[in-house]
Every structure is written in structure tokens, then in C-alpha cells.
Image (spheres, rainbow, N blue to C red):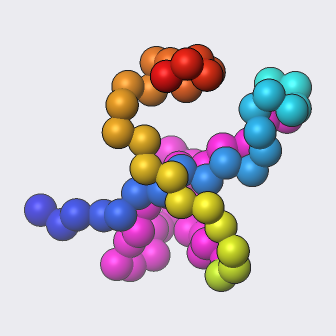
Amino acid sequence: MTKSQTFGLIYEDPKSVPADKFRFDIAGSVLHEVPDNASGIINKTIPAGRCAVIRHLDSHDDYTNPDK
């Protein structure tokens, strides 16, 4: 089984935009281009540049709780 790196790409702070304007991509590294498919999975390249890296090791249930 081949393993893939996974990435969550958040484009706005969810507290600063209306819910219908919030954008979030989930990405995985691939060895070959993904062919056209009915699932809507597309090929993109994460552009080079400055970014923040955060590793979240707890449950995703309390993301909005500032006390956690």
C-alpha cells in the first residue's frame, strides 16, 4: 500500500467570513496525475511561498473552543 502526504488548505479564517464564503481544500500527494473522474477530484499544485504549518493531534470536534 502506498502512503500519501495529506494537507488541509484553509484560505480564510472561518470566523471572519460568512459560512458560504469559507474555502477549504483537502489535498493528498500523488505519484501520477489523477485521471478525470466523477468524484470531482482534480490535480493542483500547492504554490511555493510562505505558509504556516499546524499539526492538530486532538479531536476535530472542538476546533472552535478557545479553551482547548
In the picture shown, does residue 61 fall above or below 10?
Answer: above
Q: Give coordinates of residue 49: x percent, y percent.
A: 69, 79
Q: Residue at x 22, y 63 (%)?
A: 3
In the picture shown, does residue 65 fall above or below 55?
Answer: above
Is residue 19 shown in magenta? no
**Closer-to-camera residue (15/20):** 15
Quadrant of the snapshot with the N terminus: bottom left
In the picture shown, does residue 37 fall above or below 39?
Answer: below
Q: Give coordinates of residue 4: x percent, y percent.
A: 30, 64
Q: Could you tell me what secondary structure mostly forms the magenta stretch?
A: loop
Q: Give coordinates of residue 45: x percent, y percent.
A: 60, 75
Q: Residue farthest to the left?
A: 1
User: Is residue 20 visible in this depiction of the protein?
Assistant: no
In the picture shown, does residue 64 fall above or below 33?
Answer: above
Q: Give coordinates of residue 57: x percent, y percent.
A: 35, 39
Q: Residue at x 87, y 26 (%)?
A: 18
Image: magenta residue range: 21-47
**Closer-to-camera residue (49/18):** 49
User: Is residue 7 visible in this depiction of the protein?
Assistant: yes
